[in-house]
Amino acid sequence: MGQNIKANGINHLALSTCNMKEQIAFFTDVLGMRLIALYWMHGVEGCWHGFLELNENSAIAFVFNPANADAQVQHGVTQPGNMMAGSAPGTMQHLALNVDSMEQLLNMRDRIRSRGVNVTGPLNHGMCHSIYFQGPEDISLEVATYGDTEYPIGPDDWIDPEVQELAGISDEELARFTHPMEYAGEGGEIAQPAFNPDGYHPNLPPEMLKGMIAMPDEMVTAQLSEPRPPSLMSEEERAAKHSS
C-alpha cells in the first residue's frame, strides 16, 4: 500500500487585517516571528499578503483588503474578543501557537511581558499548558505546549461521552472519526466532481462558481498561477496586475 495521504500540519493560517504594519510589528517583536514575505496577493486586486514564519513549513499570514475597513468588528459576531465569548460559525475563536516545553513557555511569557503586553497563565489543561493574551485588532492569542503534560492528548483519554452525545456523534461515527480511512491517492487523476449546489463552496456568484469548477485543472494552473517573487517583477507588471 502507498503512502497515506492526509493533511499533516498548517501551511499558513490567514487572518484579515486593516493594519498590516501593526500586525507585523507585534508578531515579530512580541512573539519573535520573522517576516518572510510581503507582496501583492495573487489574483485578488488591491490586496496584499504578509507572511510571518513559524517554522520552515508553516506561517501566520495577514491579508490586507481595502474592503476590510467596511467590515467593522462586532464582538460576538465577527470574533469573540476574548477566550470565553462566542462568535459566528466559521470565524476564528482564538489562535494558539506552540512551543516545545514548559521552560520555553515560561520564557515566552517573559518575552511577551517584557514588551508591555499583559499575559495570564500558565494554566494546566492536562493535555497542555497555556498562556493567554490579546493581540492587535482584538485577536485572542494563546501559546501552548504539549511538553511536560500529565495526560497526553489522544482519543483514549480525551473523548468525553457526554460531549460526544451533545455533538450528536454515535459510537460508530466516533470509531470512524478517531480512525479515518487511509487513502493513497491516484496520482492526481481524479476528475473534478460535478457542481453540487448543496456542497461546500466559496461565496461567489453562481455562474462564476460553476465556470471556475468547470475549468480544466491545467487551465486553472496556467491562467491563475504567478510563481515569480516580487524581486523578479517589474514595476510596470505589478502596476498592471494589482492596481486598485
Image (cartoon, grey):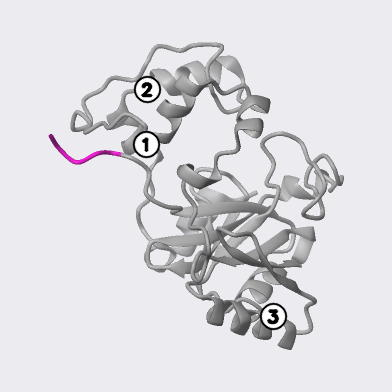
Quarter occupied by residue 204: top right
Q: Residues within 10 Å of mark 1 (few under 14, many from 20)?
A: few
| Residue 116 relative to residue 7: left or right | right
Q: Point out the image quarter for the N terminus.
A: top left
Query: Residue visible at 58% across and 52% down?
Result: 14
Instruction: Please report the residue visible at 74 percent of the width from the left and 48 percent of the height from the top.
Output: 68
| Image coordinates for residue 193, horizontal then vertical, percent | 37, 16
Residue 113 magenta-highlighted: no
Q: CA distance from mark 1 to mark 2?
A: 10 Å
Residue identifier under label 3: 112
Q: Which residue is mark 1?
A: 223
Nearest the camera: 38 or 73? 73
Seen in the picture, residue 116 relative to 42 is either above or below; the reply is: below
Q: Amino acid at mark 3?
A: Ile
Asked if the residues shown at circle 1 and circle 2 are in contact, with their CB atoms under 8 angstroms apart, the answer is yes
Q: Residues within 10 Å of mark 3 (few under 14, many from 20)?
A: some
To which residue does mark 2 refer? Answer: 215
What type is the residue that disc 1 sits on?
A: Gln
Q: Position of residue 120 (x, y in %)?
A: 76, 72
- The location of residue 67, given as percent across then percent down, is 74, 45
4 in magenta: yes
Q: N-terminal of the two: label 1 or label 3?
A: 3
* Nearest to N terminus: mark 3 or mark 2: 3
